[in-house]
Image (cartoon, rainbow, N blue to C red):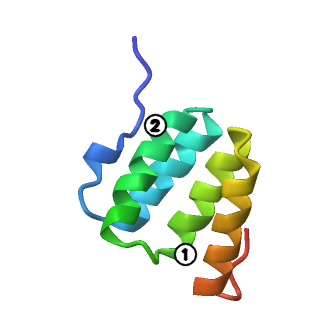
């Protein structure tokens, strides 16, 4: 029997649920999938601080440290009290 796993397509336009699924992707090491979903989310709302922060984490895990650092700064500029 296959294990059931949530997917972004199952949550529709609910960004909170979408972010929960994306975070699960990151934890499972599905960084390319997470990056693609975050890019779609950020197309709709480029100033979503949590999405920007998680994108930074994804890029950092991919070894793209300079890009990640820029996103961390961007997330903090959008929401100064943002915690990792």
Pointer 2 residue: 33
Q: Are marks 1 and 2 in contact (CB under 8 Å)?
A: no
Which label belongs to residue 22?
A: none
* Residue beneath the point at 57% across and 37% down: 31
- Residue 48's place in the image compared with 29, above or below, is below
34 lies above or below 20: above
Q: Residues under labels 1 and 2: Cα distance?
A: 19 Å
- Residue 66, by quadrant, is bottom right
Position of residue 81 measured from the top left corner of the image (x, y, whole percent): 71, 87
Picture coordinates of residue 54, whole percent (x, y): 60, 58
Query: Is residue 47 left or right of 57 when viewed as pictured?
Result: left
Name of the residue lying farthest toward the front: 66
In depth, the one of 14 and 60 nearer the eye is 60
Q: Is residue 13 above or below residue 46?
A: above
Disc 1 crowd, CA 10 A, few/some/many (<14, 14-19, 20+) = many
Question: N-terminal of the two: label 1 or label 2?
Answer: 2
Q: Residue 82: horizontal and vertical position, in percent?
A: 68, 80
Q: Quadrant of the N terminus?
A: top left
Q: Position of residue 21 (x, y in %)?
A: 46, 49
Residue 80 lies left or right of residue 3; in this view the side is right
Q: Nearer the viewer, residue 24 or 40?
A: 40
In the displayed image of the protein, which residue is found farthest to the top?
1
Q: Give the residue pinned by disc 1.
A: 49
Q: Residue furthest bottom?
A: 80
Identify the residue at horizontal 68%, vertical 38% (top origin): 62
């Amino acid at each position: 029997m296959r294990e059931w796993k949530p997917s972004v397509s199952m949550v529709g336009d609910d960004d909170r649920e979408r972010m929960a699924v994306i975070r699960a992707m990151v934890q499972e090491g599905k960084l390319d999938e997470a990056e693609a979903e975050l890019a779609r989310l950020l197309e709709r709302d480029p100033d979503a601080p949590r999405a920007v922060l998680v994108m930074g984490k994804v890029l950092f895990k991919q070894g793209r440290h300079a890009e990640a650092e820029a996103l961390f700064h961007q997330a903090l500029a959008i929401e100064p009290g943002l915690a990792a």
